[in-house]
Amino acid sequence: MNEIFAGFKQALELIVSIDPDLFEIVLRSLHVTISATIIASSIALPFAAYIAVKRFRARRLLIALMNALMGLPPVVVGLVVYLMLSRSGPLGVLGLLFTPTAMIIAQVIIITPLIASIAHQSLRDLWAMYHDLLISLNTTKWQRVKTLIWDARRSLLTAMLAGFGRAIGEVGAIMIVGGNIDHLTRVLTTAIALETGKGDFALALALGIILIILAIIINVSIHMVSKTERSKLW
């Protein structure tokens, strides 16, 4: 219990003092996670919309595979990306291992199936409502995809936030491909793992509290900006 109070106290001190090392880690965490979420969403959302409107023979198998990949073990993703980017790997010449770019790649692979699966549920229901109208208007496949994405944008935002939430809390894969290098690839989750291993539970807890606060602020801010939730102030 004492360590919990110490963690809260240390978290408050770090925030109030605007600790430069903490600020650097927070910015890097946001850079990696937001970049991964944007890239993953740009892949997942059009894909989810396309398989919602397109009928083809392997569609059900593809949907089942997409749903199964939601539970893809992060450490396995980290290992595969590590092998691909290592010096002996096919992409080793790019020199991306132990860089933020490698961490972004790993996170994209992890969260793309999650965003696509959640988005597909919303888009499939919307397509059932829009089907007759869009067919009667003789729209192309991509016109239907763009229409579904636009009209389901608030539901799709939830899918993106789910991906963001998983990415910002990820530690296994980015520890493997990033190496937790100070001032280069250290983010909040890897810093928490490091401090826990060193036995500095108060600092680890403080970083954990900051991570939770950061995730809440990002989620609430996006909801407010997009007006997905409206409340009366009276």
Image (cartoon, rainbow, N blue to C red):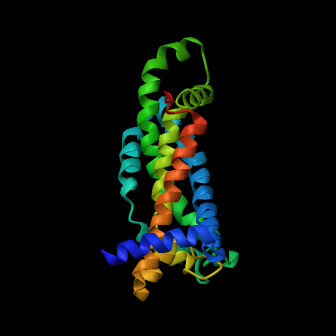
> Measured from the top left, where is residue 66 in percent x and y?
41, 49
In this view, the residue in front, 148 or 28, is: 28
Please, which residue is most extreme toward the top here? 136
Determine the residue positioned at 61% across, 53% down. Answer: 39
Above or below: residue 54 compared with residue 128: below
Determine the residue positioned at 45% across, 68% down. Answer: 208
Please, which residue is most extreme toward the right here? 94
* Residue 110 visible somewhere in the drawing: no
Above or below: residue 82 compared with residue 143: below
Please, which residue is most extreme toward the bottom here? 198
* Residue 62 visible somewhere in the drawing: yes
Please, which residue is most extreme toward the left here? 1
Q: Judge left or right: residue 152 versus residue 198.
A: right
In this view, the residue in front, 129 or 157, is: 157
In this view, the residue in front, 191 or 93, is: 191
Determine the residue positioned at 61% across, 24% down. Answer: 140
